[in-house]
Image (cartoon, helix red, strand yellow):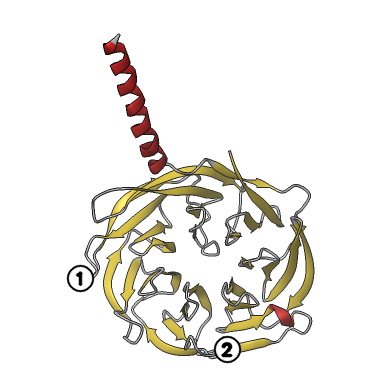
Protein backbone atom coordinates (compact mmCIF):
# COMPACT_ATOMS: atom_id res chain seq x y z
CA UNK A 1 0.00 0.00 0.00
CA UNK A 2 2.83 2.35 0.91
CA UNK A 3 4.61 1.53 -2.37
CA UNK A 4 1.40 2.22 -4.32
CA UNK A 5 0.94 5.64 -2.68
CA UNK A 6 4.60 6.44 -3.33
CA UNK A 7 4.24 5.45 -7.00
CA UNK A 8 1.12 7.63 -7.44
CA UNK A 9 2.84 10.58 -5.77
CA UNK A 10 5.94 10.22 -7.98
CA UNK A 11 3.80 10.01 -11.13
CA UNK A 12 1.81 13.11 -10.15
CA UNK A 13 5.00 15.03 -9.37
CA UNK A 14 6.47 14.06 -12.74
CA UNK A 15 3.30 15.28 -14.53
CA UNK A 16 3.51 18.59 -12.68
CA UNK A 17 7.10 19.00 -13.86
CA UNK A 18 6.41 17.97 -17.48
CA UNK A 19 3.37 20.23 -17.92
CA UNK A 20 5.15 23.57 -17.33
CA UNK A 21 8.07 22.36 -19.44
CA UNK A 22 5.68 21.65 -22.30
CA UNK A 23 3.99 25.03 -21.84
CA UNK A 24 7.40 26.69 -21.86
CA UNK A 25 8.33 24.91 -25.08
CA UNK A 26 5.04 25.65 -26.84
CA UNK A 27 2.95 28.34 -25.15
CA UNK A 28 1.03 29.08 -28.37
CA UNK A 29 -1.94 27.33 -29.88
CA UNK A 30 -2.07 26.39 -33.55
CA UNK A 31 -3.66 29.02 -35.76
CA UNK A 32 -4.63 29.94 -39.29
CA UNK A 33 -5.88 32.93 -41.26
CA UNK A 34 -9.40 32.51 -42.59
CA UNK A 35 -10.84 34.53 -45.48
CA UNK A 36 -13.56 36.99 -44.54
CA UNK A 37 -16.29 36.09 -47.03
CA UNK A 38 -17.96 38.72 -49.22
CA UNK A 39 -15.41 41.35 -48.25
CA UNK A 40 -13.10 41.35 -51.25
CA UNK A 41 -12.45 44.41 -53.41
CA UNK A 42 -11.64 44.17 -57.11
CA UNK A 43 -8.50 45.90 -58.41
CA UNK A 44 -7.42 45.09 -61.95
CA UNK A 45 -4.31 47.28 -62.05
CA UNK A 46 -1.09 45.99 -60.49
CA UNK A 47 -0.50 46.45 -56.79
CA UNK A 48 3.01 46.35 -55.29
CA UNK A 49 2.45 47.58 -51.70
CA UNK A 50 -0.17 47.43 -48.94
CA UNK A 51 -0.16 48.94 -45.42
CA UNK A 52 -2.59 49.05 -42.51
CA UNK A 53 -2.47 51.46 -39.58
CA UNK A 54 -2.06 50.45 -35.93
CA UNK A 55 -5.73 51.00 -35.15
CA UNK A 56 -6.83 48.72 -38.03
CA UNK A 57 -9.01 51.54 -39.34
CA UNK A 58 -7.16 52.67 -42.49
CA UNK A 59 -5.70 50.67 -45.37
CA UNK A 60 -3.36 51.94 -48.10
CA UNK A 61 -3.16 50.01 -51.37
CA UNK A 62 -0.87 50.99 -54.24
CA UNK A 63 -2.53 51.39 -57.62
CA UNK A 64 0.50 51.63 -59.94
CA UNK A 65 1.67 55.23 -59.26
CA UNK A 66 -1.36 56.08 -57.13
CA UNK A 67 -2.41 55.16 -53.59
CA UNK A 68 -5.95 54.11 -52.72
CA UNK A 69 -7.11 54.88 -49.19
CA UNK A 70 -9.72 52.59 -47.61
CA UNK A 71 -11.48 52.69 -44.28
CA UNK A 72 -11.78 49.34 -42.50
CA UNK A 73 -14.86 48.95 -40.33
CA UNK A 74 -16.67 45.77 -39.26
CA UNK A 75 -14.31 43.76 -41.50
CA UNK A 76 -15.43 45.74 -44.56
CA UNK A 77 -13.42 48.05 -46.83
CA UNK A 78 -14.63 51.33 -48.28
CA UNK A 79 -12.50 53.50 -50.57
CA UNK A 80 -12.40 57.13 -49.46
CA UNK A 81 -9.56 58.67 -51.47
CA UNK A 82 -7.11 58.31 -54.35
CA UNK A 83 -3.73 59.97 -53.78
CA UNK A 84 -1.47 60.99 -56.68
CA UNK A 85 1.73 62.26 -55.06
CA UNK A 86 4.02 59.92 -57.07
CA UNK A 87 4.39 59.79 -60.84
CA UNK A 88 5.87 56.26 -61.12
CA UNK A 89 5.01 52.90 -59.55
CA UNK A 90 4.72 52.95 -55.75
CA UNK A 91 7.08 50.34 -54.28
CA UNK A 92 6.52 50.50 -50.50
CA UNK A 93 3.96 51.78 -48.00
CA UNK A 94 4.41 52.00 -44.22
CA UNK A 95 2.35 53.59 -41.47
CA UNK A 96 4.07 55.11 -38.45
CA UNK A 97 2.90 53.58 -35.15
CA UNK A 98 3.80 56.35 -32.71
CA UNK A 99 2.51 58.93 -35.18
CA UNK A 100 -0.37 56.93 -36.57
CA UNK A 101 -1.70 59.77 -38.70
CA UNK A 102 1.43 59.66 -40.85
CA UNK A 103 2.70 57.17 -43.40
CA UNK A 104 5.62 56.62 -45.76
CA UNK A 105 5.50 55.86 -49.46
CA UNK A 106 8.37 55.16 -51.84
CA UNK A 107 8.37 54.92 -55.61
CA UNK A 108 10.34 54.24 -58.74
CA UNK A 109 10.27 58.02 -59.19
CA UNK A 110 13.20 58.04 -56.67
CA UNK A 111 11.26 59.78 -53.88
CA UNK A 112 10.15 58.91 -50.37
CA UNK A 113 7.10 60.89 -49.31
CA UNK A 114 5.77 61.44 -45.79
CA UNK A 115 2.04 62.13 -45.80
CA UNK A 116 -0.77 62.52 -43.30
CA UNK A 117 -4.03 60.60 -43.40
CA UNK A 118 -5.67 63.74 -41.98
CA UNK A 119 -5.14 65.29 -45.38
CA UNK A 120 -6.94 62.57 -47.30
CA UNK A 121 -9.68 64.99 -48.30
CA UNK A 122 -7.01 67.33 -49.66
CA UNK A 123 -4.01 65.06 -50.25
CA UNK A 124 -0.73 66.92 -49.83
CA UNK A 125 2.52 65.51 -48.57
CA UNK A 126 4.33 66.68 -45.43
CA UNK A 127 7.88 66.12 -46.70
CA UNK A 128 9.54 64.69 -49.79
CA UNK A 129 12.91 62.93 -49.39
CA UNK A 130 14.89 63.16 -52.61
CA UNK A 131 18.44 62.32 -53.57
CA UNK A 132 18.23 58.88 -55.15
CA UNK A 133 19.39 58.88 -58.74
CA UNK A 134 17.15 55.90 -59.54
CA UNK A 135 13.96 54.33 -58.21
CA UNK A 136 13.57 53.02 -54.68
CA UNK A 137 12.94 49.29 -54.27
CA UNK A 138 13.17 48.60 -50.54
CA UNK A 139 12.28 50.59 -47.44
CA UNK A 140 12.65 49.98 -43.69
CA UNK A 141 11.52 52.01 -40.67
CA UNK A 142 12.90 51.31 -37.18
CA UNK A 143 10.76 50.76 -34.08
CA UNK A 144 11.79 54.11 -32.59
CA UNK A 145 10.65 55.77 -35.84
CA UNK A 146 13.66 58.06 -36.08
CA UNK A 147 15.44 56.09 -38.83
CA UNK A 148 14.44 55.25 -42.39
CA UNK A 149 16.69 53.08 -44.57
CA UNK A 150 16.11 52.90 -48.32
CA UNK A 151 17.59 50.74 -51.07
CA UNK A 152 17.41 51.57 -54.75
CA UNK A 153 18.26 50.68 -58.32
CA UNK A 154 21.39 52.86 -58.07
CA UNK A 155 22.90 50.25 -55.67
CA UNK A 156 22.90 52.77 -52.83
CA UNK A 157 21.68 52.32 -49.26
CA UNK A 158 20.59 55.61 -47.75
CA UNK A 159 20.06 56.37 -44.07
CA UNK A 160 17.50 59.05 -43.28
CA UNK A 161 17.30 60.34 -39.72
CA UNK A 162 15.58 62.95 -37.60
CA UNK A 163 16.02 64.32 -34.11
CA UNK A 164 13.45 62.59 -31.87
CA UNK A 165 12.66 65.97 -30.32
CA UNK A 166 11.94 67.51 -33.72
CA UNK A 167 8.95 67.38 -36.02
CA UNK A 168 7.99 64.26 -37.96
CA UNK A 169 8.69 66.30 -41.10
CA UNK A 170 12.33 67.10 -40.26
CA UNK A 171 14.10 64.20 -42.00
CA UNK A 172 17.49 64.40 -43.72
CA UNK A 173 19.89 61.98 -45.38
CA UNK A 174 22.60 61.31 -42.78
CA UNK A 175 24.70 58.73 -44.64
CA UNK A 176 24.97 56.66 -47.81
CA UNK A 177 26.64 53.29 -48.37
CA UNK A 178 27.45 51.81 -51.76
CA UNK A 179 28.83 48.30 -51.60
CA UNK A 180 26.25 46.23 -53.46
CA UNK A 181 27.13 45.75 -57.11
CA UNK A 182 23.49 45.46 -58.12
CA UNK A 183 20.22 46.92 -56.88
CA UNK A 184 19.22 46.57 -53.24
CA UNK A 185 16.20 44.29 -52.95
CA UNK A 186 15.70 43.79 -49.21
CA UNK A 187 16.34 45.69 -45.96
CA UNK A 188 15.63 45.10 -42.29
CA UNK A 189 16.51 46.90 -39.03
CA UNK A 190 16.78 45.10 -35.69
CA UNK A 191 14.83 46.22 -32.62
CA UNK A 192 17.81 47.97 -31.01
CA UNK A 193 18.34 49.94 -34.24
CA UNK A 194 22.06 49.20 -34.21
CA UNK A 195 22.13 46.66 -37.06
CA UNK A 196 20.83 46.75 -40.62
CA UNK A 197 20.88 43.79 -42.99
CA UNK A 198 20.59 44.23 -46.75
CA UNK A 199 20.41 41.85 -49.68
CA UNK A 200 20.35 42.29 -53.42
CA UNK A 201 20.79 40.85 -56.87
CA UNK A 202 24.56 40.59 -56.37
CA UNK A 203 24.06 37.45 -54.21
CA UNK A 204 25.36 39.09 -51.04
CA UNK A 205 24.07 39.97 -47.61
CA UNK A 206 25.61 42.99 -45.90
CA UNK A 207 25.67 43.34 -42.11
CA UNK A 208 25.82 47.07 -41.31
CA UNK A 209 26.25 48.30 -37.73
CA UNK A 210 26.75 51.39 -35.60
CA UNK A 211 28.10 51.49 -32.03
CA UNK A 212 25.80 54.27 -30.86
CA UNK A 213 23.37 56.86 -32.18
CA UNK A 214 26.10 59.38 -32.98
CA UNK A 215 28.46 56.98 -34.76
CA UNK A 216 28.63 56.16 -38.47
CA UNK A 217 27.19 53.04 -40.01
CA UNK A 218 29.90 50.54 -41.01
CA UNK A 219 29.80 47.29 -42.95
CA UNK A 220 31.01 44.68 -40.46
CA UNK A 221 30.32 41.46 -42.38
CA UNK A 222 29.59 40.29 -45.92
CA UNK A 223 27.89 36.95 -46.57
CA UNK A 224 27.99 35.32 -49.99
CA UNK A 225 24.84 33.36 -50.81
CA UNK A 226 23.72 30.98 -53.53
CA UNK A 227 21.97 33.29 -55.96
CA UNK A 228 19.76 36.38 -56.16
CA UNK A 229 18.14 37.35 -52.89
CA UNK A 230 15.22 39.58 -52.02
CA UNK A 231 13.49 38.62 -48.76
CA UNK A 232 15.24 39.35 -45.46
CA UNK A 233 13.81 40.12 -42.01
CA UNK A 234 15.05 40.34 -38.42
CA UNK A 235 13.33 38.02 -35.94
CA UNK A 236 15.17 39.38 -32.91
CA UNK A 237 18.25 41.53 -32.31
CA UNK A 238 20.67 38.76 -33.28
CA UNK A 239 18.69 36.56 -35.68
CA UNK A 240 17.39 37.15 -39.19
CA UNK A 241 15.61 35.04 -41.78
CA UNK A 242 16.66 35.13 -45.41
CA UNK A 243 15.23 33.60 -48.55
CA UNK A 244 17.37 32.79 -51.55
CA UNK A 245 15.36 33.15 -54.75
CA UNK A 246 16.57 29.77 -56.04
CA UNK A 247 15.74 27.69 -52.95
CA UNK A 248 12.52 26.45 -51.33
CA UNK A 249 14.04 26.93 -47.90
CA UNK A 250 14.19 29.76 -45.42
CA UNK A 251 17.73 30.25 -44.10
CA UNK A 252 18.10 31.39 -40.49
CA UNK A 253 21.25 33.31 -39.53
CA UNK A 254 22.34 34.12 -35.99
CA UNK A 255 25.16 36.17 -34.51
CA UNK A 256 27.37 33.90 -32.39
CA UNK A 257 29.64 36.64 -30.99
CA UNK A 258 29.23 38.73 -27.85
CA UNK A 259 28.12 42.37 -28.00
CA UNK A 260 31.64 43.69 -27.50
CA UNK A 261 32.91 41.71 -30.51
CA UNK A 262 32.46 42.21 -34.23
CA UNK A 263 29.39 40.29 -35.41
CA UNK A 264 29.73 36.85 -36.89
CA UNK A 265 26.42 35.76 -38.38
CA UNK A 266 26.33 32.11 -39.39
CA UNK A 267 23.59 29.96 -40.88
CA UNK A 268 22.35 27.72 -38.09
CA UNK A 269 19.03 26.44 -39.40
CA UNK A 270 17.07 25.77 -42.59
CA UNK A 271 13.27 25.83 -42.65
CA UNK A 272 11.56 23.95 -45.49
CA UNK A 273 8.82 25.99 -47.15
CA UNK A 274 5.68 24.93 -48.95
CA UNK A 275 5.35 25.87 -52.63
CA UNK A 276 7.97 26.16 -55.34
CA UNK A 277 10.44 28.95 -56.01
CA UNK A 278 9.01 29.87 -59.42
CA UNK A 279 7.57 33.36 -59.47
CA UNK A 280 9.52 34.75 -56.52
CA UNK A 281 9.27 38.49 -57.10
CA UNK A 282 10.49 41.21 -54.80
CA UNK A 283 7.11 42.85 -54.17
CA UNK A 284 6.25 40.62 -51.21
CA UNK A 285 8.55 41.40 -48.31
CA UNK A 286 8.84 38.91 -45.45
CA UNK A 287 7.01 39.89 -42.26
CA UNK A 288 7.75 39.13 -38.62
CA UNK A 289 5.08 39.99 -36.05
CA UNK A 290 6.24 40.20 -32.43
CA UNK A 291 2.81 40.03 -30.80
CA UNK A 292 1.91 36.72 -32.46
CA UNK A 293 5.52 35.55 -32.96
CA UNK A 294 4.63 34.77 -36.55
CA UNK A 295 6.98 34.82 -39.55
CA UNK A 296 5.34 35.19 -42.96
CA UNK A 297 7.17 34.61 -46.22
CA UNK A 298 6.32 33.95 -49.86
CA UNK A 299 7.64 30.97 -51.77
CA UNK A 300 6.55 31.06 -55.39
CA UNK A 301 2.76 31.20 -55.37
CA UNK A 302 2.45 30.17 -51.72
CA UNK A 303 2.41 32.20 -48.51
CA UNK A 304 3.90 30.37 -45.50
CA UNK A 305 2.89 31.20 -41.91
CA UNK A 306 5.48 30.05 -39.40
CA UNK A 307 5.27 30.22 -35.61
CA UNK A 308 8.62 31.11 -34.02
CA UNK A 309 8.96 29.60 -30.54
CA UNK A 310 11.86 30.45 -28.26
CA UNK A 311 12.95 27.48 -26.18
CA UNK A 312 14.63 28.32 -22.88
CA UNK A 313 18.29 27.39 -22.86
CA UNK A 314 21.44 28.13 -20.91
CA UNK A 315 23.35 28.71 -24.11
CA UNK A 316 24.25 32.20 -25.34
CA UNK A 317 22.41 31.66 -28.60
CA UNK A 318 18.63 31.60 -28.82
CA UNK A 319 17.22 28.15 -29.45
CA UNK A 320 14.38 28.87 -31.86
CA UNK A 321 11.80 26.41 -33.12
CA UNK A 322 10.10 27.15 -36.45
CA UNK A 323 6.69 25.51 -36.79
CA UNK A 324 4.77 25.77 -40.06
CA UNK A 325 1.15 26.58 -39.21
CA UNK A 326 -0.42 27.31 -42.59
CA UNK A 327 0.43 27.51 -46.28
CA UNK A 328 -1.91 29.31 -48.69
CA UNK A 329 -1.56 28.57 -52.41
CA UNK A 330 -2.70 31.51 -54.55
CA UNK A 331 -2.71 29.53 -57.80
CA UNK A 332 -0.70 29.94 -60.99
CA UNK A 333 0.67 33.47 -60.81
CA UNK A 334 2.31 34.10 -64.18
CA UNK A 335 4.33 37.12 -63.02
CA UNK A 336 4.46 36.10 -59.36
CA UNK A 337 2.63 39.28 -58.33
CA UNK A 338 1.42 38.72 -54.79
CA UNK A 339 1.75 41.35 -52.06
CA UNK A 340 0.51 41.47 -48.51
CA UNK A 341 0.67 43.00 -45.06
CA UNK A 342 -0.13 41.98 -41.50
CA UNK A 343 -1.76 44.29 -38.97
CA UNK A 344 0.27 45.28 -35.90
CA UNK A 345 -1.88 43.13 -33.61
CA UNK A 346 -1.68 40.20 -36.04
CA UNK A 347 -5.46 40.03 -36.52
CA UNK A 348 -5.65 40.89 -40.23
CA UNK A 349 -3.65 39.50 -43.15
CA UNK A 350 -4.44 41.47 -46.32
CA UNK A 351 -3.29 40.59 -49.84
CA UNK A 352 -3.62 41.40 -53.51
CA UNK A 353 -2.65 38.90 -56.22
CA UNK A 354 -2.61 39.01 -60.01
CA UNK A 355 -4.83 35.95 -60.47
CA UNK A 356 -7.87 36.98 -58.44
CA UNK A 357 -7.18 40.72 -58.91
CA UNK A 358 -8.76 41.21 -55.51
CA UNK A 359 -7.85 42.80 -52.21
CA UNK A 360 -8.59 39.96 -49.80
CA UNK A 361 -8.94 40.11 -46.02
CA UNK A 362 -8.11 37.17 -43.81
CA UNK A 363 -8.55 37.06 -40.04
CA UNK A 364 -6.50 35.30 -37.36
CA UNK A 365 -8.13 32.40 -35.54
CA UNK A 366 -6.72 29.91 -33.05
CA UNK A 367 -7.52 26.25 -33.57
Horizontal arrangement in the rendering, residue 44 relative to residue 317 (left or right): right
Report the front residue among 278 and 83: 83
The residue that label 2 is drawn on is 169
Image quarter hosting the N terminus: top left
Residue beneath the point at 69% across and 74% down: 67
- Mark 2: which secondary structure? loop
The residue that label 1 is drawn on is 261
Identify whether 292 is placed above or below 224.
above
Residue beneath the point at 77% across and 85% down: 122
Horizontal arrangement in the rendering, residue 268 relative to residue 282 (left or right): left
Report the front residue among 329 and 78: 78
Horizontal arrangement in the rendering, residue 180 relative to residue 262 (left or right): right
Report the front residue among 98 and 221: 98
Image quarter hosting the C terminus: top right
Q: Residues within 10 Å of mark 2 (few under 14, many from 20)?
A: some
Q: Position of residue 206 (x, y in %)?
A: 33, 71
Q: Residues within 10 Å of mark 1 (few under 14, many from 20)?
A: few
Can residue 200 be seen here?
A: no
How many numbered markers are drawn? 2
Identify whether 200 is placed above or below 272.
below
Q: Position of residue 307 (x, y in %)?
A: 47, 48
Amino acid sequence: MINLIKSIFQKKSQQQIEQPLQQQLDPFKHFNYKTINNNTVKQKSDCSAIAINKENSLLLVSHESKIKVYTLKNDSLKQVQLITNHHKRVTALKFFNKYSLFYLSSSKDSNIIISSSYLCANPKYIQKLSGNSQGIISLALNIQEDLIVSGSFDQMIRFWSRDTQSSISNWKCSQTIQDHSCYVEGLSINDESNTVVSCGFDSRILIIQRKNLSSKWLITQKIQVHTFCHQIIFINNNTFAFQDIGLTKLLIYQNINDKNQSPNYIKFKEVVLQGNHNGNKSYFQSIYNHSKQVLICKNGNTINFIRVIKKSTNQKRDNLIFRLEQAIDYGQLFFGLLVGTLSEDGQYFITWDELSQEIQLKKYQEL
